[in-house]
Amino acid sequence: MLKEFKQFIARGNVIDLAVGVIIGVTFTATVQSLVKNLINPLIGLFVGKIDLSDLTLKVGDANFKYGSFLNSVINFLIIAFVVFLIVKVVNKFTRKEKAPAAPTEVEYLKEIRDLLKEKEAK
């Protein structure tokens, strides 16, 4: 069982996934910092508040923290846009391999002819 576990961990997919998760976590922290320290103050110039997470709507005894939700939406949009740009750049530089052309009838007939000649020669 330990041997199977070592083989499982040694596969590239598991390691690639771990690296992807680590990069994703650090990327998310970077985007959250960007939103908190740069974008929120910019929006705050127009809204009048720098920290959007303080925005709440009180209905009865319930407090709706729509400012925190706005922060999450901004984070999501930035992350989605950056991922879109990364995928677009990667797709631009990744060359697609051309599939080999399917043999034509003439090529098949030539193969059959050559095989028949080989068989007759034996």
Image: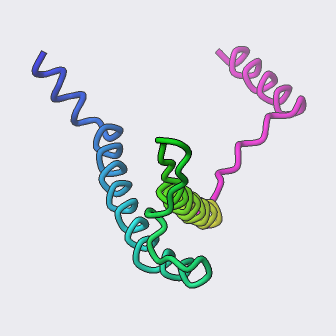
Based on the displayed image, in which of its 4 quarters is residue 47 positioned?
A: bottom right
Residue at 43%, 67% in the rendered image: 31
Residue in the foreground of this view, choosing between 33 and 25: 33
Residue at 29%, 45% in the rendered image: 18
Main SS of the magenta part reads helix
Residue in the foreground of this view, choosing between 18 and 10: 18
* Relative side of 97 to 34, left or right: right
Task: List x then y, in percent, for residue 93.
Answer: 60, 66
Task: List x then y, in percent, for residue 90.
Answer: 57, 62
Residue in the foreground of this view, choosing between 112 and 29: 29
Instruction: Check the image and name the residue furthest to the left.
Output: 2
- Location of residue 56 with respect to 39 vertically, above or below: above
Q: How many marks?
A: 0
- Location of residue 61 with respect to 2 vertically, above or below: below
Task: List x then y, in percent, for residue 71.
Answer: 50, 61
Q: Is residue 99 magenta?
A: yes
Residue in the foreground of this view, choosing between 87 and 99: 87
Instruction: Check the image and name the residue furthest to the right.
Output: 106
Task: Please state the extent of the stretch shown in magenta in the rendering.
Answer: 93-122
Q: Is residue 52 magenta?
A: no
* Relative side of 28 to 8, left or right: right
| Image quarter in which the N terminus is found | top left
Residue at 77%, 27% in the rendered image: 111
- Location of residue 12 with respect to 81 vertically, above or below: above
- Location of residue 111 with respect to 12 vertically, above or below: above
* Relative side of 15 to 99, left or right: left
Residue at 86%, 26% in the rendered image: 109
Q: How is the image coloured?
A: rainbow
| Image quarter in which the C terminus is found | top right
Task: List x then y, in percent, for residue 64.
Answer: 51, 48
